Image (spheres, helix red, strand yellow):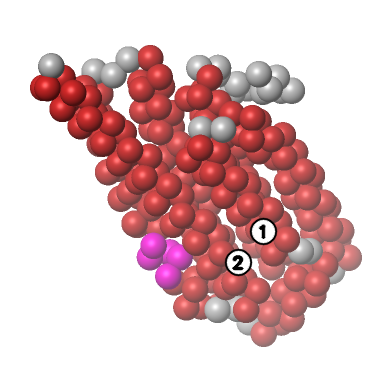
């Protein structure tokens, strides 16, 4: 009897460690978005380099958490809700790692802009005024934070709200793309810089998509429902 209680307690500790590590990884990705947005706004090369360097840590955390998931499944042979939690976590960390990859794409585009000639810097200043990337980034960061919070509380209702809000982020991204296309048509000299801004915008939008995926996994963990590839059917 005591041995069974001990094993159960150890299993609970393993699961709690997994959850904590996912939230830690999510916090790192969130800070990466903040850093790269500041780099874009302030033309900071220091922030760009730190983001590129920190992507290795995000990758390492994904691998460590995945290895932990495999170890727990092999050792504990979880069933039902515990197995859903582990499988959901495995998918979540993939989305967090891919978010890190998108942020790295942003860093590389910003670095290209920063290394361009002075005229490109002038074009960027105009483009910054015409397209509010910081607002888009703030929205994506909020989505990611909300998704992680729903995971911490296993709140399926709030997770459904995160999924629904992704449409607003998509609409804002499309608005930025339209403005960039118009600007390129009016001033072909700005095409190279505008394309880099478009890559940055697209990467931010993809972070929002990954936040949506995380919220979908929360619903799966909490309720056992797979709401991926569905539309308008996330509420229980």
Rendering coords of residue 235 (x, y %): 68, 22
- For label 2, the SS is helix
Question: Observer-nearest residue: 225 or 137?
Answer: 225
Q: Is residue 213 visible?
A: no
Residue 37's tag is 2
Residue with the mark numbered 1:
138
Question: Observer-nearest residue: 7 or 25?
Answer: 7
The kind of secondary structure the magenta stretch mainly shows is helix
Rendering coords of residue 79 (x, y %): 32, 15
Q: Is residue 48 visible?
A: yes
Magenta stretch: residue 234 in it? Answer: no
Rendering coords of residue 127 (x, y %): 77, 70
**For the residues bearing labels 1 and 2, Cβ distance under 8 angstroms:** yes
Q: Residue at x 74, y 81 (%)?
A: 122
| Residue at the far front in the pictured view | 2
**Span highlighted in magenta in the image:** 50-54
């Amino acid at each position: 009897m005591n041995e069974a209680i001990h094993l159960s307690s150890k299993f609970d500790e393993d699961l709690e460690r997994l959850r904590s590590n996912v939230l830690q990884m999510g916090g790192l990705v969130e800070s990466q978005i903040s850093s790269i947005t500041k780099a874009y706004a302030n033309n900071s090369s220091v922030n760009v380099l730190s983001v590129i360097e920190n992507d290795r840590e995000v990758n390492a955390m994904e691998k460590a958490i995945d290895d932990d998931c495999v170890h727990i499944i092999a050792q504990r042979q979880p069933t039902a809700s515990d197995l859903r939690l582990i499988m959901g976590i495995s998918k979540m960390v993939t989305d967090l790692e891919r978010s890190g990859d998108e942020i790295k794409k942003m860093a590389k585009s910003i670095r290209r802009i920063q290394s361009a000639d002075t005229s490109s810097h002038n074009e960027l200043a105009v483009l910054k005024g015409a397209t509010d990337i910081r607002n888009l980034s703030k929205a994506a960061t909020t989505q990611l934070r909300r998704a992680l919070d729903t995971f911490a509380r296993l709140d399926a209702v709030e997770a459904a709200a995160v999924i629904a809000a992704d449409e607003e982020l998509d609409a804002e991204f499309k608005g930025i793309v339209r403005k960039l296309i118009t600007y390129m048509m009016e001033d072909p000299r700005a095409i190279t810089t505008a394309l880099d801004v478009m890559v940055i915008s697209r990467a931010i939008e993809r972070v929002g998509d990954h936040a949506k995926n995380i919220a979908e996994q929360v619903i799966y963990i909490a309720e056992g429902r797979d709401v991926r590839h569905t539309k308008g059917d996330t509420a229980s």
